[in-house]
Image (cartoon, grey):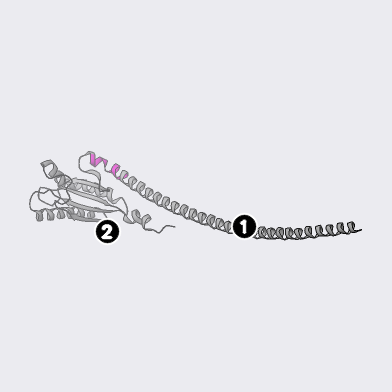
Amino acid sequence: MKILGLIVVLLAGCATVDRAKYDTDVAGLKKQVKELESGNAQLFSERGTCQQQLSTCQTDLANTRSKGDATLASALKRIQELENISAAQRAIFDKLRGQLDSLVKAGKLSVSIVRGQFTVQMSDKILFDSGRYELKDTAEETLIELTGILAGLEGRNWQVSGHTDSDGDDDFNWKLSGNRSRVVLAFMIEHAMPPNHVSFAGYGKNAPTATNDTPENKSLNRRIEIVLIPDLEALLGPLTQPPN
């Protein structure tokens, strides 16, 4: 009986030790579970933040791309507008060249683009006697034909400019160039050139087309030019308008 009692006591002690260890292990496991749950919650929170940041970045990228596309489209539109204006200008130049071709071939005038402007050039000897500003009778027919062509380009402005070589007194040359261009302008107005679309200027020797070192070059500088004034509103309009 004593042996049986001892065995019971020993078994009871083992059971007590195992229960304590069990409770300790369970408590440890619960703590680990709690820590894992806390860590998992933190991960979910960080994941939500990352997703929100990613969504914000994607929105910003889309907005930036949209603005970039709009800016590019606006720039391309303006370029196209300028190309259309340039093409229209070339068409006008080509048409005028064709209309003036017979006068060019007859040696009565020349046509060129000077500083980006369509320019008709006439030698002074065709229009005037040396040192004078009364039109020659032989020049009138040419000027009448020229005026009819230029006046036919509706809504465009012209400037008649007089030029001399460097010989002689500067003051005389300046007055001579101004008087010659004024006489040509008055004649053109008398023959249907709208007065609100034409002006005149005298440059004297100050805008030569060639150096004044030979008789041939000096003769080139003694001239009347009729210049097509660019339509600045049409040319600059696309550049001054705010982008869409």
Residue 84: % across, % down: 38, 48
Q: Nearer the viewer, residue 123 or 236?
A: 236
Determine if residue 64 is in view.
yes
Rendered image quadrant of residue 15? bottom right
Q: Which residue is mark 1?
A: 43
Dot 1, how many residues are within 10 Å of its Cα: few (below 14), some (14-19), or many (20+)? few
Residue that sits furthest to the front in the current view: 2
Residue beneath the point at 14% across and 42% down:
217
The majority secondary structure of the magenta stretch comes to helix
Q: Decide whether residue 208 is among the magenta residues.
A: no
Determine if residue 192 is in view.
no
The dot on residue 196 is: 2
| Quarter of the C terminus within the rendering | bottom left
Residue 27: % across, % down: 72, 61
| Quarter of the N terminus within the rendering | bottom right
Residue 122 shown left or right of residue 243 in the figure: left
Residue that sits furthest to the left in the current view: 168
Q: Nearer the viewer, residue 118 or 237?
A: 237
Residue beneath the point at 23% across and 38% down:
105
Residue beneath the point at 89% across and 56% down:
3
Location of residue 112 with respect to 64 vertically, above or below: above
Dot 2, how many residues are within 10 Å of its Cα: few (below 14), some (14-19), or many (20+)? few
Q: Which range of residues does the magenta coloring cover?
A: 95-104
* Element marked by disc 1: helix
Residue 29 shown left or right of residue 185 in the figure: right
* Element marked by disc 2: helix
Q: Earlier along the polypeptide chain: callout 2 or callout 1?
A: 1
Q: Name the amino acid, label 2.
A: Asn
Q: Name the amino acid, label 1.
A: Leu
Q: Nearer the viewer, residue 147 or 208?
A: 208
